[in-house]
Amino acid sequence: MRRQRNWFLPLLVCAVLTQTTVHLARPLVSYRVIALGGDARAVGLVAAAFAVLPLLVAIPLGRLSDRLSRLGLLLAAGTCLLAAGSLLMSVSGSVPALALNSAVVGLGQLVFLVAAQGTVARWSSGPLLDRGFGWLTAAVSVGQLLGPLLTGALLGSATGEALATASRHAFWVCAGTALLALPVVAVVAVRTPVRRRAPERAAEAPSSTLALLQRSGVPTKLFASLALLAAADILTAYLPLIADSRGIAPAVVGVLLGLRAAATICSRLLLDRLLIHWRHDVLIVASAAGSAAAFALVPVPGLGLVGMGVALVVGGFLLGVGQPLTMTLMVRAVPVEARSRGLALRMVANRIGQVALPAAAALVAGSTGAGALWLACAVLATASAAAHRASATS
């Protein structure tokens, strides 16, 4: 336990800083699109661009992670990409340029998370695996909490040309937050053990992508993970638009998104206790179904700020339960030599959702973005039903 703590706590700090960068950048992109005259469809397409490069490189990156004896360089590479993408977005003067640089930020997040999750999967075992993924995703949620709060603080009630200027300066803060993680990444790289097993063994493992997909329950777990993450992304992308249509200031939107993230942190820190009473599959079904019902209330016309806040807190708590459990179940469903590839496959599914759902949401968003969030809720409900069927037949 003490040996794990030497690298695990710094890894959590890195996760907080890098994910604060990501979740500061993503609402900023939506406001930047608005400042450049973009509409709901433009917001959806830029959100989809975030996942394009990760979709293409996740599996090769997972193979590389399985072969490396240490993952510190991957952690550093992901962090640098986050900083570079943020700086590029600060000088982007068009929606296509924002989409391209959003893809760079998405790639940076993928590289960092593949390395971080691979580190936890490699050096945690037994009950420490659920706890490790639970705390890692809780650290991610801290970033999801701090990012929107920083967005609100940096943008305030700016509109028009002032919004364009404020959003450009806020991207500099994004880059600085990512760069703060680099010294901590060095600590993680030094303190993690070196894997003694020969890399060739991982290369020889008979675990192709198709073979992993054919393992029992894997497709259902991938769909649940896809739905949970895509719903959070669509909420982050479209809540500013929904709020703007109701005259709600960006600072208040930051608080609302922060409430959702705080509830998610709580559920992930309580994951050990929840698993005492319910099985993994039961919690995943409840996570998807409950968050779908709660988030469906957010765009309802006439719902006040208090009602929106309550719906986001309930939905955020339930949403937070499912993601770490899908990580644990994926790790247990694949061979030891293919754990990073299994996690990378899960990320491919996530990125497919992050591309397909925002693109589909852009078509049904409407002028206020409500249709986009309802589409995400429908996908969550479908994933819950699929997980329930798989659990009943297993």
Image (cartoon, helix red, strand yellow):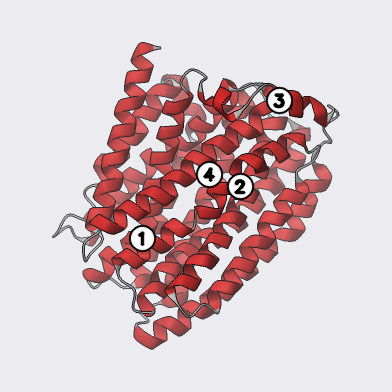
| Separation (CA) of disc 3 from disc 1 | 37 Å
N-terminal-most mark, 4 or 3 = 4
- Amino acid at pointer 3: Glu
N-terminal-most mark, 1 or 2 = 1
| Secondary structure found at label 1 | helix
Determine which residue is flagged by label 1.
44
Camera-nearest residue between 203 and 267: 203
Residue 88 position within the rendered picture, expressed as x and y whole percent measured from the top left: 58, 73
Question: At x 63% / y 27%, what residue is drawn?
Answer: 128
Determine which residue is flagged by label 3.
337
- The label nearer to you, 1 versus 2, is 2
Determine which residue is flagged by label 4.
138
Camera-nearest residue between 363 and 128: 363
N-terminal-most mark, 3 or 1 = 1
- The label nearer to you, 2 versus 4, is 2
Asked whether disc 3 touches disc 1, contact meaning CB atoms under 8 Å apart, the reply is: no
Q: Is residue 76 left or right of residue 223?
A: right
Asked whether disc 3 touches disc 2, contact meaning CB atoms under 8 Å apart, the reply is: no
- Amino acid at pointer 1: Gly
Residue 350 position within the rendered picture, expressed as x and y whole percent measured from the top left: 47, 42
Camera-nearest residue between 221 and 272: 221
| Separation (CA) of disc 2 from disc 4 | 25 Å
Determine which residue is flagged by label 2.
57
| Secondary structure found at label 3 | helix
